[in-house]
Structures are given as C-alpha cells and as structure tokens.
Image (cartoon, rainbow, N blue to C red):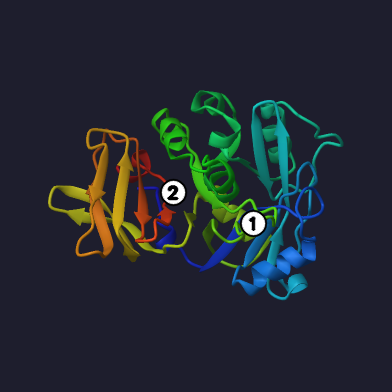
Amino acid sequence: MTWQSPFEAPGSWYKAAFHVHTTQSDGRVAPEEALTWYREQGYDIVALTDHRRLTLGAPAAAHSGLLTISGVELDGPGYHMVGLGAKTLPESVDRLPVQVAANAIRDGGGIAIMAHPYWIGQTSAEILSVDGISALEVFNTVCEQERGLGYARQTWDELLEAGKRLWGVAVDDTHWIGDEAGRGFVMVRAPELTEEAVLAAVASGSFYASQGPTIQDLRIVDGEGGPCLSVRCSACARIVFHAAGPLGRVVHPTAHGILTGGSIALQADQIYVRVECTDAQGRTAWSNPVYLADVLS
C-alpha cells in the first residue's frame, strides 16, 4: 500500500484560504486588511490570488503568525485557474490558452488548480485534456451565492472515473462584496508552517476541504469481507461515499439526527473512493479521493 492517510502523517493541521481577491485586482479590501481578517478568524495560511497579478508569499513571522503563499488567478478562453506557490510567471499572462497557463504555473514552481468549472461552463472533457493541473475547486462560495453554480462534484467524479487524478479544494473566492469570506476553506496537514511544507502537502493531497464540518480521521481498516475505508467526523446528518466501481455511491443516512462516522468496503475494480460529510446546516466537508491502486497494490 502506497497511500498514507493525512491523519497518520506527522505534523499539524492548518486552516487555509486558497482563493482571495484584494484591491490589487477587483477586490474591495486592501491586502493587509484581508490578511488581518483571516488571521483574526483563526486561519493559518492565505494565498492572495488576484487576477493576472502574482503576489509573492512571506513567512508566518512577517504577518504575526499568518503564512502567506504565492498566488495568482489566470484566465483565458473557457477557463479560470488558480496558481499556488509560483515564484515567476511570463511577462504577459493576458488570456493565455489553458495549457499554456498550466505550464506557466508549473514552470514557475507552482501548483495549478482549476477554478469554479461549473460557473465558467467548463466541462470535464475539456479539463481532461489539460496536463499538469493538480486540483479543482469542488466548491466556490461566490459562484454559489451569486449564480448557484458553486459546486463541481459531478465534474470531479467524471474526471476521477476517467482516470485523471485531481484533489478537491473549497474556497470562498472573496471579493469582499458580500458575506462570502470564510465559507469555504482547506485544512492542510503539514510538518511545519512554511510555504515549502504546505505546498508539498497540497501536491500530495494531504488535506481536506470544508464549509464547516471537521473530518477527524480517514483510514483503511479491516472489515468482515476485507479492507474498508473508514471516516470519523464532527456531528453530521449525512455521510456519503462516492466510488467508481460496482458499489457506486453508498449513503449513511441520519441516525437519530447525528452521525460521526461510517465506512465502505473496498474492491479491486473500484478506481477511487471519496467521502462527503454534511451537517444539519447543509455544510459539507470533502475528503480527497483515495485511489484503490494505491491501497490494494
């Protein structure tokens, strides 16, 4: 088995905002004011991802304990893309073709994340053809609040079933216009609060995405018929396991109004399994997919 659960990895959990706009592009709040807000809300990590403008990160000591990592949002025909950790970009990033944008982020040392595909009208087939992206936004707060197009779960599952390995992030994409800030975030498991460690954790999928609920454990356990994927979470009303394979989707319904865990049997012909934990307020936490080839090999 080559998969390691983030919950078994050494380190600590850090709360991160990976899609944030400021007055450097079309946000209504200056960078320092934005960072102050996230620090006061208990965040550990922020990437300022203004449109077509690379904002370099700084160690946590520079912002009273809040780590900033380099960020940018690029866009072009049929896509928006967040870049985390890139130190350099081409001189002109105006409406780059999607593959050129992904290459530019990776060549600059960063991680490419496909942003709000449902809102932009980007299909899974279009994303499938792009090399070098590491994740997509499974939830984007602004796109959901303004257009009802903030979830990309179906797109994610279609890509995973087609064999494309992608992690899932939740973001607020705040422009400081409404109350979107803080309503989508990522919990990263990293050995230390440095940009290098956080980016390595994100690249390896050592995180989960959430609108509020907490995933407390995710690991392989022995079941009656063989290995199972087991999850523990904060009090939720619904736990759903999504899998490509013979079992498909497995739902653990409400049990007296409270669920704090569940499991699914693993089978060799499944491609992946991922978990959604939804609380009574309708807020969801998403695990990253566990690829069966990494578990049953």
Q: Nearer the viewer, residue 199 or 4?
A: 199
Q: Quadrant of residue 257?
A: bottom left
Q: Is residue 66 left or right of residue 245?
A: right
Pick the front one: 30 or 204:
30
Going from the N terminus, do you reach mark 1 or mark 2 first?
1
Quadrant for the C terminus, please: top left
Q: Is residue 297 something one can see in this rendering?
A: no
Residue for badge 1: 178
Q: Residue at the location (77% across, 56% down)?
A: 28
Q: Residues within 10 Å of mark 2 (few under 14, many from 20)?
A: many
Residue 99 against residue 55 in the figure, above or below: above
| Amino acid type at mark 2 | Asn
Q: Is residue 115 above or below residue 97?
A: below
Of the residues tagged 1 and 2, which is closer to the observer?
Answer: 1
Q: Position of residue 252 (x, y in %)?
A: 23, 52
Q: Position of residue 241 (x, y in %)?
A: 30, 47
For residue 194, the mark is none
Horizontal placement of 232 versus 15: left or right? left
Label 1 vs label 2: CA separation? 29 Å
Q: Secondary structure at mark 2?
A: loop
Q: For the point 59% across and 45% down, which residue is it? A: 146
The residue at the point 56 percent across, 64 percent down is 15
Find residue 155 and report its horizontal and vertical position in percent. 46, 33
- Residue at image mark 2: 288
Specify the farthest residue to the right. 91
Q: Label 1 neighbourhood size at 10 Å, few (<14), some (14-19), many (20+)? A: few
Q: Decide if residue 114 is on the left or right side of residue 73.
A: left
Image position, residue 228 (x, y; %):
24, 51
The residue that appears at 71% across and 62% down in the rendered structure is: 68
Q: Is residue 203 above or below residue 261?
A: above
Q: Is residue 20 above or below residue 38?
A: above
